[in-house]
Image (cartoon, grey):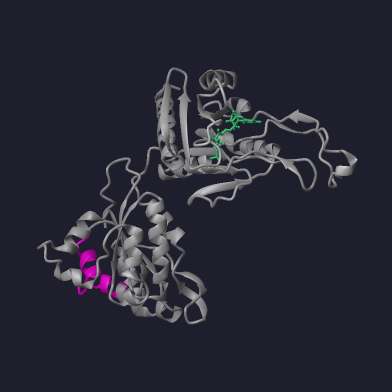
Amino acid sequence: MSSPRLEPGSSALRVLVGVSGGIAAYKAVELVRLLKKEGHSVRCALTRAAGAFVTPLTLEVLSGHRVYQEEYLAGDGSGEELHITAAEWADVICVAPATAHTIARFANGLADDFLSTTVLAFDGPLVLAPAMHSIMWRQESVSANVARLRERGVTLVGPAVGPLASGDVGIGRMVEPAEILATINGLQEPGPLAGRRVLIAAGPTREALDPVRFISNRSSGKMGFALARAAVARGAAATLVAGPVSLPSPPGVERVDVTSAEEMAAAVRIAAPQADLIVMAAAVADFKPTSVRTSKIKKSEGGLDSIELERTEDILAGLRAIAPKAVIVGFAAETDDLLSNARSKRVGKDVDFIVANDVSRADIGFEGDHNEVTVVGGDTETRFERQSKSALAERLIDHVSRALVDRERQPA
Ligand code: PMT
């Protein structure tokens, strides 16, 4: 099995998801959803038996393409050999779940249905997610088929140990879709950030007043999480220091959860020296209460009439000293004089780029799914028009990665 036929640097794959007839077929729906969310293109092929567990319509809606079924082996009247078309389209074929019967057909080169015929016509990477009862998984015949497939370079993900459809517990459970996604992502050509470590800080911080109350801001973490996802998609090892947000971790990211500015500073200080690229997208509190009460402040005490604040540590300003070779990117959340504030911040904090966004606008910045920024560098200022934070994150990572590559080319 050769590696994916990918344009160099492409971060998206064309994945043909084959579904065979096991109870775990319902998880194929989540796998298709995750693959699409990751930016991959997806088509599906259902075996006859799988049709009893999951409907073609569900997969058709999620993948955005008709689902290949048994009858397509006879063609669709267009004269096209659809199994050849499907095999030529796919960068990767992933069969999840892969039943013992399907594994046996692949191991023995059978081509008696659409999926096995397409697999036989495919010379790219094949990923199988086995699913069967433990007794079957341990059968000598199944072990021999699995060994033959592994010898040919087929990737098996799982099976996992856990509750089985029969109610027993043992090996044979299909792994979770997120694990299959991570395996498929790992098949991509090494991206421009392969071998690099990226540190992203995201979300707000919370500065406690008493055990109940705190000072915070409207950051949702979406911008930073999208940046971490984009870095991983380009092959980086990403550490995401996250303030209190309600977002799932992007697959493949090492997440460090923090609450206060002080905790965020400590977490960033630990990861920064190893980082090649650091992006401070977090909305770190500039101030915190000078004292935190151990019991809830009573309104009757008037303890909330005025709150004494002190400055927090400026994490961004301290990064150059602990990560002298890294490309350091700060953000600027401004409500006026956007570019002049960003330019002075970039110089004042000794960083390579400041990503400036106008947070007085309701349609970009905090909380929403869109942003519009100007990236202020040493000798460039690049505007990125309003777009989704996930699309913008891809472009921002590509933009600042070029500085990383240029820096690495400079003589030591
Ligand atoms: O999280 P979302 O809802 O998606 O919203 C995204 C965002 C609006 C939060 C993001 O795009 C953004 O602007 N993040 C920076 C917000 C911020 O704190 O900007 P600032 O101008 O106050 O801070 C300037 C820079 O210094 C930032 O990189 C910040 O991370 C950093 N900083 C600030 C204070 C502090 N004590 N230490 C810091 O490192």
> 140 above or below 203?
below
Residue at (48% x, 50% y) in the render: 252
Q: Is residue 188 magenta?
A: no
Q: Is residue 80 left or right of residue 324?
A: left
Secondary structure mostly seen in magenta is: helix
- The image quadrant of residue 179 is bottom left
**273 horizontally vs 383: left or right:** right
Locate residue 347, reporting x and y percent. Answer: 55, 18
**Quadrant assignment, res 314:** top right
Question: Residue 68: x and y, percent?
Answer: 25, 66
Is 119 contained in the magenta span?
yes
Q: Is residue 275 above or below residue 254?
A: above
Q: Residue at x 9, y 63 (%)?
A: 79
Question: Residue 194: which quarter of the image?
Answer: top left
Position of residue 132 measured from the top left corner of the image (x, y, whole percent): 41, 76
Percent position (x, y) of residue 318? 63, 27
- Is residue 238 in view from this perspective? yes
Image quadrant for the N terminus? Answer: bottom left
Q: Nearer the viewer, residue 200 or 157?
A: 200
- Residue 95 is at least partly visible in this image: no
Report whether 237 appears left or right of 52. Answer: right
Q: Nearer the viewer, residue 16 or 237?
A: 16
In the picture shown, does residue 116 fall above or below 190?
Answer: below
Please report the residue visible at 42 percent of the width from the left and 43 percent of the height from the top.
Answer: 235
- The residue lying toward the viewer, choosing from 79 and 118, is 79
Q: Residue furthest right?
A: 301
Q: Which residues are magenta?
A: 103-122
Vertical arrangement, residue 232 with respect to residue 68, above or below:
above
Q: Write down which quadrant ligand 1 falls in.
A: top right
Image label count: 0
